[in-house]
Structure formats: C-alpha cells, structure tokens
Image (cartoon, coloured by chain):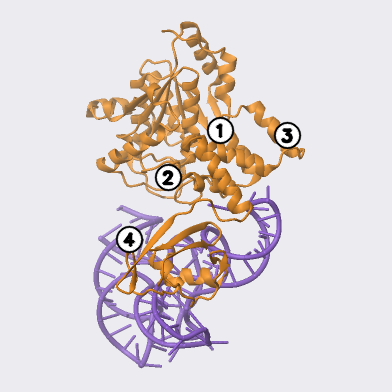
Amino acid sequence: MTQAFQPVDAQLEYIGKGVAEIIPETELREKLETSRKSGKPLRVYLGVDPTAPDIHLGHTVVLRKLKHFQDLGHTAIFLIGDFSAMIGDPTGQSETRPPLSREEVDANSKTYLAQVFKILDQQKTEVRYNSEWLDKQSSYDIVRLCGRYRLARMLEREDFRSRLEKGQPISVHELLYPLLTALDAVNLKTDVELGATEQKFNLLVHREIQREYGLPGEVALTMPILVGLDGQRKMSKSLGNYVGITEPPDAMFGKLMSISDELMWSYYDLLTDVPVAELLALRAAVERGVRHPMEVKMELAARIVADFHGAKAAAQAAEQFQRVFRDRAAPAEMPEIRLFRRNGSLEHAEGVIGTLTPKWCQLLAYLRQSESVAVATRLIEQGGFEVNNRLVDDPAARFDGSAPGSYDLRLGKKKYLRLIVE
RNA sequence: GGACGGGUGGGUGAGCGGUUAAAACCAGCAGACUGUAAAUCUGCCGCUCCUUGCGGGCUACGGAGGUUCGAAUCCUCCCCCGUCCA
C-alpha cells in the first residue's frame, strides 16, 4: 500500500513552480524527507470560502498547486469553509462585508465542487466542511481559543491596521476569522496549507495555533495573485477582467489571446504544468525570434482550454480563432435563430415581432442579440454589421422575412449568427 | 445623543436656476491598423419612434412634495452613507 515517492529534490522542484513563498522552506524539505522515509503522504489542504457561485482562473492557481501535491502522491484536502463563509474573511476587505446565509453557502458549495474537480482528481481528494467541527464548538471552547492569541498580533495585519487608521469600522467577529479557521488546521492535522499571498497572515495564525494545540505546525505555502486580462489588476469577477472556468471554449480561448505578450509568461507559470526549465527555453526562443509570440500564446490558450473542456474542444477553439480573427472569415459553426411566419408577422422563441419586414436594428434588439435598439443602430451606423458578407450600414434598412431563407449575420468583430426564416 | 459633510449615468467624479441626456477620466462598443479580442489612432456610448432630421416622444441626477416660465441645481420633510465629539 505504501507508494514510492519521488526523490525530495524532484518533489521540491515540482512544488516550487510559480510559488510565492514557502514558510519555512527548510521545514517543507524535512517533512518531505520524513514522508518519503515512512511512506506516509503529507496532508495538504486548501480552504476556500464559498462566497460566490463560480470560480475563475484566478482561483485555479492555488487549486493547481494542490493538484501538484496530489500528483506527487500526497493527500489533497479540499476544505469548504461553509461555516467561515458565514463570518466573512476580512482579508483584502476595506470594509465589513455582509455575512452569507446558510442557503447561499450551500448552493455555492455545490457549484464549487463541480468546478474544482476539473482540476483535482475527485477519487483522491478528501473533501471536508469546516462546519463539521466549528458547529460543535461551545462558547467555552471559543473563549479558550481566543485566549491563545494576542490582540496586538491580530492588529498587526494590514487590513485591520489601515482600517483602524482610517477610522473605518472593524467588527469584532472579524477578529475571530483566522482563529476559527485555525481550528480547521488543528482538526485536519495538516502538514501544509496553501493559499494566495493575501492569505499569508491567516496561514501563519493557523500554524501558530496548531502548535498551541500540541501539533507540529504546518508549512504555509503561498501562491501569487493572478493578474487579470487587463494586465493591471488582480483577476476578479467584479472588474470583468476574468476568465470563468465554465465559459465555453471559444470565449476562453479568445479572452486568453487578448492578454499581453508579457503577461503570458506569468499565465504559463501559474496556469499550466509546463516545467520551469521548458518555460525558460520557450521564453528565450521567443526573445531570439525563433518562436512567434502569437503562436506561443495560442499554445497557452489551447492548454488552458484543454484543462476545462478537453483537447478536442481546445483544438477547435484554436481553429475557430484563426479563422475568425486571423483570416477574418465567418466561423465554421454559428448559433442559429429560427423565425416563423405566422399571420403576416414573424415570431420566434422570445415572442412575436409584429411585422414581416422589421428594421434590422429593431430585429436585433427583439432577438436579444443587442442590448437595445439604440445599441444596434449604433453598430449598424458604424459599419459593424454584415448580412451574408455584405455590409449593411443604413440604420433604417429593413429585413425582409416574407419568404423562407437563411442569413449569416456578423455583428461587430466577435459575434456571428445565422438567421433562418421558415 | 450632538456637530458637520455627502448621496449625479456601469464606476470614479464635475456641474450648483436655462444651448445640461448632463464635463472629465475609466470601463464598454465600432472602425482603422496589427501576429492577437494586445498596443495605438478615430468615432460612438439613456430608452424609443419615424418620413434618419443637427427630427419627434419618453425617462434620468437618493425619495416625496413645493417655489419658478424653467430645477441635478433653491425650499420643506423623509430615507441612506461617511467623518468628528460623546
């Protein structure tokens, strides 16, 4: 049953890719050595609060690191902070945020797990919920827990200090967050905990509290924050600079192609398993002009798409991208919308249009292919609208739906669709 | 509880009685250019209707009233947010 672990140096190299900090590094080496000798895998965990219903590539950076440990034969524990999500992690928050309800948390947990297993091997992952033990803590337990940490230490953290200085409120329950989540580490008896760099404070508290409870104290491993598509700020849904992992292959591919050449290296580092040495060689080849940056970026995009949609979908997305953006041709397949003629009017799934010959701008809005008539009019006026490869730039132009037919439409540079009148 | 300051379009934020559908910036969209949905440049950017005209109508500056020929701009009340003092 004991499995053979790779030599420690090899493991460290694999684990070290893309990492921001390992605290303390020597301890990780020792743990790996002990584990290799005894044949006992390390217990490595990642705690995630299910605060939003879906995850994007930014979240996968740490997940991928957890997978690396899993690849090496260690035990990956995916901890869902269903209890702690109801408190709210003060990390990076400039203000107290509203706690989530039990229902929201449960719903989010479900969608999270489905998405997480696109990266982790479900068979080998230990999934836990921190309500398992946190629900059971008595007031007495909590008071004792609080006795093990000092206020001054707590206030050292940047979030709290700056809020305090600016006179912004800090709710007392926020102080409890790192302490309660420390109980996760205590209960799971973990050897390593992963987190983004902004989690460093929490991870260190966990390590200390573990020791207070007579455990060895875990190693904290942090991963850099993934920069968003804009190349400026951290990837986040609210900034709109993200790639969701449930997005369709084409959208994913296109979004990834829009990153700058420079940013692409960081994505290679954090979002793929390409070994460090290979990456350095690739980068050198691009710099010497041996490899074309666009080509290399397309490989990156294909790799990432393949992680979530499979190799075949990735290849198709790449082909589609070439076709539509490089060769400026219509895509091989486009979404179809069917219209039916009835009682001297056109109808479609969304409702009745009212005439057989609507203006294009209105038709597009009615079919919800455009936000509003005004937006569609603008698109047409600006030369972004083609019907069967012919430019239509008269905003008053009408669509003739009086006879059956098929029309290929281009809306701007990204959107294509086929209109079929039956 | 008291004293101030503030709530404007997707965001930040000007305007403080009329040519203000509301500056500027960001985001977004289109076109040009490009190896790319990068960068850059140009234009657009409330909704809607038609006979597409520097056309018509509607909605909009926290909410409700009021003053005025005319209000995002002045007044009253209400709601919300922030700061300071307790």
Quick one: label 2 or label 4, which is nearer the N terminus? 2
Quick one: label 4 or label 3, which is nearer the N terminus? 3
Mark 4, other Cα within 10 Å: few <14 / some 14–19 / many ≥20: few
Mark 1 and mark 3: Cα distance apart in space: 18 Å
Residue under disc 4 on the same chain as residue under disc 1: yes
The picture places residue A395, in percent across and down from the top left corner, at 50, 75
Mark 3 and mark 2: Cα distance apart in space: 39 Å
Q: Mark 3 lies on which chain?
A: A
Q: In this view, does A8 lie above or below A387?
A: above
Quick one: label 4 or label 1, which is nearer the N terminus? 1
Q: Mark 2 lies on which chain?
A: A
Mark 2 and mark 4: Cα distance apart in space: 44 Å
- The one nearer the camera, A339 or A260, is A339
Q: Which amino acid does label 3 sit on?
A: Ala
Is B2 left, or right, of A61 in this rendering? left
Quick one: label 3 or label 2, which is nearer the N terminus? 2
According to the image, label 3 marks what residue? A284
- The one nearer the camera, A10 or A95, is A10
Residue under disc 2 on the same chain as residue under disc 4: yes
Letter of the orange chain: A
Question: In the image, which is nearer the foreground, mark 2 or mark 4?
Answer: 4
Question: In the image, which is nearer the foreground, mark 4 or mark 1?
Answer: 4
